[in-house]
Every structure is written in structure tokens, then in C-alpha cells.
Image: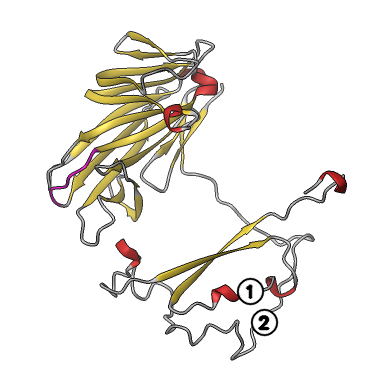
Amino acid sequence: MKVAAATVSFDGGLSTPVSPFSPMLYEPGWTGHGATSVPGEDADGWHRFTMRTANASGAPRIDGRSRFAETGDGAIRAEWTATPSADAILAELFVAGSVPFSRFGGGTALLDGRELEIPVQIGPKAHLFRGAVTNFALLDRDGAERLRVAFDAPTRILLQDGRHWDGTALSLRFFFAEGPVEGGRRYEVRSTVRTPADGPLVLSEGNPVTLEAGPDWIPLEGAVWIEPGSARDFSRVVPHHAPAGTFGRVGGHFEFEGLPGQPQRFYEDEWSLAPPPHLGVWSAQLMRSRHQLLFFRFTPSPAPCAAPASCS
């Protein structure tokens, strides 16, 4: 029998073959914030996560929990709770999902049995549906029922055409709340999720990944590449903090938790996966004072051009 894997994600979410589902919120003005996992798991199987309600230091946070379990009949029991630490002004607090229009354009949404056509082409309305339902399903353009969600209680949801913002997906939102939230109040989204056309859902915690050096690996010499006192020596630009994390996480305005009121500077550089000797030449622009940390992003080198005359 064909089965479909559902994976618990690090942000308090659940990833299914049809759509990922993750907690999220929008501030007024539509600045969005996703969830961050809190290490550990409660004895009763709840995973903890947190969300900030604004970038400002000291802004209320959302303390959340999620729990997922197989039902024994091919579904996944999916539960989320969200509790604000204090009253907060929000636009929306919800569990987010999305499906591609390339597959679902021309399909159908079932809303407590009522059919809603999913447009193939972008139309005048961004919000295709907003209201409370108990049962929700999505059929793709071929008529296959790809997703079915049964809520424990009538739950307000949103189906939004992301093409109005140059996207390519139909956005799904299952709301905890719309508008201001009350500190200390527990908001909930409790549901049972099925993917009928993809097969019974089986919960997976993810597979471990092991990296082993192979013949194509490039050895990295352990010698110091930076000559002390040279333009590439940053050891005296700012005080060194070791080990990493000494002053806690970085919060609003790029301030460390342990150094409130002292904004930090960050710099990102980009190198190739096939760098010159000693990992490339460091840009002199890095020698700007008061940069606290350096981030490096490695990107693949461009493939050799088969027809040099046609390559720019």
C-alpha cells in the first residue's frame, strides 16, 4: 500500500506531501514573523515554539505548542496552541499552508460540502474565501482529493490567491485569532489531517544525515592564512567574544540579550564552492570598524561555458 510521510518541522509545523503547515503571524502593516523551535519535548508529546509579535525589544511574544500523532486510520492528529505573553496588537495569528496553482488551478475547494472553484487565471479577488468551516478539502485540477482537514470546532480559514503579490501558490491560513490578542489567553487550532489521493499518512521524525569525506573533497590546510597586523586581520577591530552565544540570542535592533541597548553590526560575504587558494581574497570592504560578526554564504561556481562566444 502506498503511504505518505508527514514530517515534524523545527518551527512547530507539520510537512505533508501536499502542503507544509507552520505557525505564523502578521503585525499591522503585514510584517510577518514565523515560529522558532524551543529545544526539548514535553512528556505528553508537545513540541514548544515561540514567535515574536514585533521587532521592538521587549515586545510581547507568543508561546506555542504543537503535537502530532497518527490516528491509526491513515490520518494525522495535528494540534497547535498559542498563548501571548501580554496583550498585543496583531493583524493575524494563524497556521500557514500553501499549494501550487500549477497543480490546483482549476481544482476545487470543499468548504463544509460547498464547492468553490480555484481559478486557473488570476482574478479580481485576492481572497477566494474567508470564513468559518468544520470540514475543508482540496481537489487538484484532475479531481483527486489531495487534502482533507477536519477541525474539532468551527475554525476561521482563509484561501488567498498569492499571484496578486507575484506569488505562485494558493495560501491557506487556519486562524488562531484575527486582530488584537489577549495576554495569557490560549488560542487553539485542533484538527485531523488526511491526504486521500497520496495515501495514508505516516508520521516521520526525519532521517539522520551523515556526511563523509570522499575523493572529490578538497583538503583544507589548518595553517593560519591571515598575517597578524595585515588588512585582513580583524582581531583588534572589536572585542572577541568566545564561545559563540556568550551574550545570548540576537533580538530586535540586532542587540544581544546579554548586551541590551548596544546594537551590533553584521556583515555577509559570498564565496564560491571552488575558491582560489586560501578560500579567496577577502574584500577590503570587510575592514569596516565595529562589525561584530561575519556571515559567509557559499554558492556553486558557474558551469564552464560550452560556447564562449555566446557567454557574457
Q: Earlier in the sequence, mark 1 or mark 2?
A: 2
Which residue corresponds to the image point at 61% horizontal and 55% vertical from the top-left? 210
Q: Is residue 298 above or below residue 177?
A: below
Q: Amino acid at mark 1?
A: Trp
For the stretch drawn in magenta, what is the main secondary structure?
Answer: loop
**Mark seen at residue 76:** none
Which residue corresponds to the image point at 45% horizontal and 15% vertical from the top-left? 119
Can residue 249 be seen here? The reply is no
Q: Is residue 99 above or below residue 179?
A: above
Q: Amino acid at mark 2?
A: Trp
State the image coordinates of residue 279 (x, y, percent, origin top left).
68, 71
The residue singled out by tag 1 in the image is 282
The residue singled out by tag 2 in the image is 225
Q: How many marks?
A: 2
Left or right: residue 140 compared with residue 90:
right
Left or right: residue 280 compared with residue 94:
right
Left or right: residue 173 compared with residue 122:
left
State the image coordinates of residue 163 (x, y, percent, origin top left).
46, 27
1 vs 2, front mark? 1
Which residue corresponds to the image point at 32% horizontal and 40% vertical from the top-left? 67
Give the SS element for disc 2.
loop
State the image coordinates of residue 266 (x, y, percent, origin top left).
45, 68
Quadrant where the N terminus sits is: top right
Question: How busy is the neighbourhood of tag 2: few (under 14 within 10 Å), some, or many (20 plus)?
Answer: few
**From which residue to which does the magenta span run?**
86-91
